[in-house]
């Protein structure tokens, strides 16, 4: 948890641990609490690795001349995480909406993962770590 105070304005950045968040809300109710992007990204990546296992189908095998190349699970995770990074870095609400639609499209075959990210992160705490909202916090 990082605590910053300037001119009686308080800002706390946490890894979403409920205990410190509850204490801050109780003791310093005027404090802005943001979430650490590094920790959220780490959690999304771990969930992506476990939920987005790729079962190869014929369309996942590409032929380049005499060479056959399979789509690797790591390629899928990296693609999803690139789109996730775009979601978090969205500078406007319009760009956020557009990139979330792209994220949904990329993740649509991984319903369990997509549902988890939407219900536990995007629908509940996006204002605490997505750039379009966090850029409005001044200290």
Image: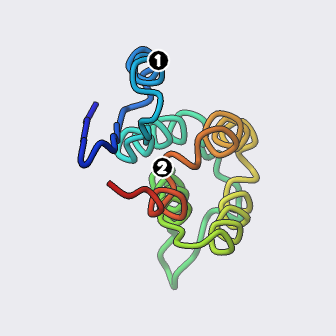
- The N terminus sits in image quarter: top left
Q: Which of these two is toward me, 76 or 60? A: 76
Horizontal side of 45 relative to 126 (left or right) equals left
Question: Residue placed at 40% from the left, 23% from the top?
Answer: 24
Horizontal side of 125 relative to 9 (left or right) equals right
Question: Residue placed at 47% from the left, 75% from the top?
Answer: 67
Q: Which of these two is toward me, 90 or 50? A: 90
Q: Position of residue 2 (x, y in %)?
A: 25, 36
- Nearer the N terminus, badge 1 or badge 2? 1
Position of residue 78 relative to residue 16, above or below, is: below
- Are there few (<14), some (14-19), or many (20+) residues within 10 Å of tag 1? few
Q: Of helix, strand and loop, which one carries label 2?
A: loop
Q: Which of these two is toward me, 60 or 108? A: 108
Q: Which residue is mark 2?
A: 129
Residue 9 lies in quadrant: top left
- Are there few (<14), some (14-19), or many (20+) residues within 10 Å of tag 2? many
Q: Which residue is mark 1?
A: 26
Question: Residue placed at 43% from the left, 37% from the top?
Answer: 33
Position of residue 75 relative to residue 26, above or below, is: below
- The C terminus sits in image quarter: bottom left
Horizontal side of 113 relative to 77 (left or right) equals right
Residue 51 lies in quadrant: top right
Task: Identify the residue at the far front of this view.
Answer: 7
């Amino acid at each position: 948890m990082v605590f910053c105070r300037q001119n009686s304005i308080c800002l706390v950045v946490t890894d979403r641990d409920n205990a410190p968040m509850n204490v801050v809300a109780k003791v310093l109710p005027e404090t802005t609490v943001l979430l650490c992007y590094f920790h959220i990204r780490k959690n999304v990546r771990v969930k992506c690795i476990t939920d987005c296992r790729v079962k190869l189908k014929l369309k996942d095998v590409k032929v380049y001349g005499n060479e056959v190349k399979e789509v690797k699970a790591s390629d899928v995770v990296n693609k999803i995480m690139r789109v996730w990074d775009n979601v978090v870095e969205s500078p406007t609400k319009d760009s956020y909406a557009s990139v979330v639609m792209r994220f949904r499209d990329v993740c649509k075959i991984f319903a369990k993962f997509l549902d988890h990210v939407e219900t536990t992160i995007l629908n509940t705490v996006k204002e605490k770590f997505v750039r379009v909202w966090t850029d409005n916090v001044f200290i």
